[in-house]
Amino acid sequence: MVRVPSTYAVVGTLPVRAAIRRDLVPLLGPWLLARRLHIPPHATPIASGRGAAYRIGLPGGLRVVVRLYRRGGLLARLVHETYLGIHPRPLRELALTAEIRRRGVAAAEVLAARVEGWIAYRGALVTAEVPAAATLVEALRAAPDVAARRALAAAAGRAVASLHAAGVFHADLNLTNLLVHPGNDGPSIVLLDFDRARLQATPLAARVRRRNLKRLARSLAKLDPTGALAGDAERQAFRLAYGLNGHARCAC
């Protein structure tokens, strides 16, 4: 059962409905409730694995990121953007992210979720743009030296530790779902994409943490097969910031 938080209003009727942060209904409602979602021509595509995310500037200076739900894996060869179910994934991700933020995790704020259809549906998620942000892999590539990369790895370690301490298992923990942005005390991390996240009331157990960290490690191995972006120094910085001992296996 998906319970949209009370800070959001569910508007529209079949076949199109949306959950929108209440103060943004006048601004986002007319756009999100159109029969077909229109991506403005001035939108900037964001490089992603499924090529379906855009940065958009809206009236009043609001800058958002819109992600259209796209299937991955083998099923994507047959069905590109249609999902089946009575609990739409966009509404679930909105509710999960709101709860994750309530627990103190630095997650990007979801402003709205759109569902088009009923049992068979398409979806979209609207999040607040994180200013001056880059994915962790982009930030590592742009870092000028080992000290800068260590600072990025440490920020990632702290962010993932906070996630796990809050009882959140990120089903797609990878270097593109960790956004780096400038902070007062160095780089900070914002986490994205809680579509298939799992929540529990207590911090994750050690074995569950290890499984999630191994997923992050696989992402790093895929994006940095030679270890040019994250060698021993960066990995040690991640371990220390996360709270792992030097023998634990992790991503950075």
Image: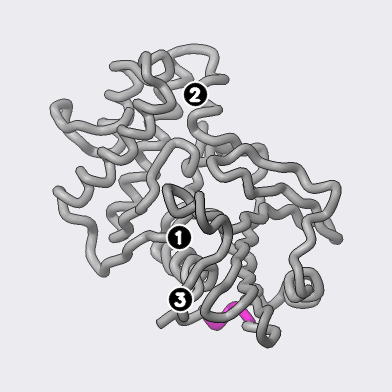
Q: Looking at the image, which residue is at 35% across and 45% down?
A: 160
SS type, badge 2: helix
Task: Indicate whether 229 appears above or below 97.
Answer: above
Q: Is residue 131 magenta?
A: no
Looking at the image, residue 44 sits to the left or right of residue 15; the answer is right
- Please state which of residues 99 and 28 is positioned toward the viewer in this rendering: 28
Task: Indicate whether 145 appears above or below 127.
Answer: above
Give, as a three-letter code, the residue at label 1: Asp
Which residue position is annotated with label 3? 85
State the count of labels: 3
Nearer the viewer's eye, disc 2 or disc 3? 3
Give, as a three-letter code, the residue at label 3: Gly
Which residue position is annotated with label 2? 140
Quadrant for the C terminus in the image: top left
Q: Residue furthest bottom?
A: 13
Q: Is residue 8 magenta?
A: yes
Q: Earlier in the sequence, mark 3 or mark 1?
A: 3
Which residue position is annotated with label 1? 195
The crowd level at tag 3 (other Cα within 10 Å; few <14, some 14-19, many 20+) is: few
Report the magenta stretch's main SS: loop
Q: Looking at the image, which residue is at 83% across and 54% down?
A: 40
Give, as a three-letter code, the residue at label 2: Leu
Q: Earlier in the sequence, mark 2 or mark 3?
A: 3
SS type, badge 1: loop
The crowd level at tag 1 (other Cα within 10 Å; few <14, some 14-19, many 20+) is: some
Check contact, mark 2 vs mark 3: CB within 8 A: no
